């Protein structure tokens, strides 16, 4: 509830400026600052746990998962655009931006904004909500599998609800994305992998291969003629590619940890099983 109040209030408190990129980055940095404060407060006064218990045991493996997540997340829109080009729905056009100091500044501010979005949302929906849902549903009459599945679903549904979804296809995309990010947390036990997937997807789909009708700043300009429900940023092509992305993610974890399944860090939260 506190996070929702801060999320809604901040844009009203920060007045619009002439630079929308700077304002977006500033809003995300402020939201990140307040969210971290809320997480610390919740850890100390509500959950009685160390902050690292929310998937923040930073290590070399954590950072490696983060980088791998960026690659996995970025591959989803990259492959989707490639399929769109093959299908004749998307074409590469002449770039509308030149490599100037202003352009580089916009890209940098966009990166800051995207990192802020990824860290905040993964802290809230995976680190806090999913962790507490697992523990809260740790009931003697519920099996371990049911506990994790229901907690996973709750986190994904809340994630989808907080994203605007004017159509059923959009809602399906955000729900599926929430399930993928939740699976990344459940399988790795840490937030490095889901943060990387989230940031990689948002940056590549929003700025490297943007399929929005009027992207704010882009690396490669595209002309999209296909239907939005199929080729859009939350269209069926990108939603369908979340499945091979999940398989690739599990394969990476299998290669890195020599195991497959729910992380021991997650299973350790189940006290009644």
Image (tube, rainbow, N blue to C red):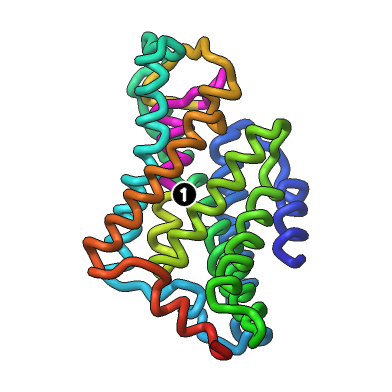
- Residue 42 visible here: no
200 is within the stretch colored magenta: yes
Question: Which residue is painted at 69% across and 37% down in the image?
Answer: 165
Q: Describe residue 42's horizontal placement relative to residue 94 as left or right.
A: right
Secondary element under disc 1, as helix, strand or loop, is: helix
Q: Describe residue 68's horizontal placement relative to residue 148 as left or right.
A: left
101 is within the stretch colored magenta: no
Query: Which class describes the residues within 10 Å of circle 1: few (<14), some (14-19), or many (20+)?
Result: many
Q: Quadrant of residue 152?
A: bottom right
- Residue 268 visible here: yes
Q: Quadrant of residue 167?
A: top right
Q: Does 240 sit above or below residue 41?
A: above
Question: Which residue is painted at 35% across and 46% down in the image?
Answer: 72
Q: Tell which of 192 and 181 is nearer to you.
A: 181
> Residue 228 appears at what percent x and percent y?
59, 21
Give, as a single range, the part of the protein colored magenta.
Answer: 199-216
Question: Which residue is painted at 34% across and 53% down in the image?
Answer: 249
Question: Which residue is painted at 49% across and 23% down in the image?
Answer: 211
């Amino acid at each position: 509830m506190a996070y929702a109040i801060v999320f809604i209030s901040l844009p009203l408190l920060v007045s619009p400026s002439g630079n929308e990129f700077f304002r977006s980055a500033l809003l995300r940095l402020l939201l990140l600052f307040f969210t971290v404060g809320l997480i610390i407060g919740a850890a100390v006064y509500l959950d009685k746990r160390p902050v690292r218990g929310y998937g923040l045991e930073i290590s070399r493996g954590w950072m490696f998962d983060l980088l791998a997540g960026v690659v996995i997340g970025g591959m989803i829109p990259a492959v989707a655009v490639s399929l769109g080009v093959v299908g004749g729905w998307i074409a590469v056009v002449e770039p509308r931006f030149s490599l100037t100091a202003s352009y580089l500044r916009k890209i940098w501010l966009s990166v800051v904004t995207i990192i802020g979005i990824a860290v905040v949302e993964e802290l809230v929906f995976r680190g806090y909500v999913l962790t507490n849902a697992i523990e809260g549903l740790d009931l003697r009459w519920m099996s371990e599998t049911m506990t994790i599945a229901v907690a996973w679903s709750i986190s994904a549904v809340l994630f989808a609800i907080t994203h605007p979804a004017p159509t059923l296809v959009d809602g399906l995309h955000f729900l599926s994305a929430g399930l993928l990010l939740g699976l990344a947390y459940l399988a790795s036990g840490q937030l490095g992998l889901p943060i990387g997937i989230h940031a990689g997807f948002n940056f590549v789909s929003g700025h490297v291969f943007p399929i929005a009708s009027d992207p704010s700043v882009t690396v490669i300009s595209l002309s999209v003629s296909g239907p939005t429900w199929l080729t859009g940023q939350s269209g069926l092509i990108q939603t369908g590619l979340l499945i091979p992305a999940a398989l690739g993610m599990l394969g990476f974890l299998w290669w890195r940890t020599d195991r497959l399944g729910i992380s021991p860090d997650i299973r350790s939260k189940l006290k009644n099983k």
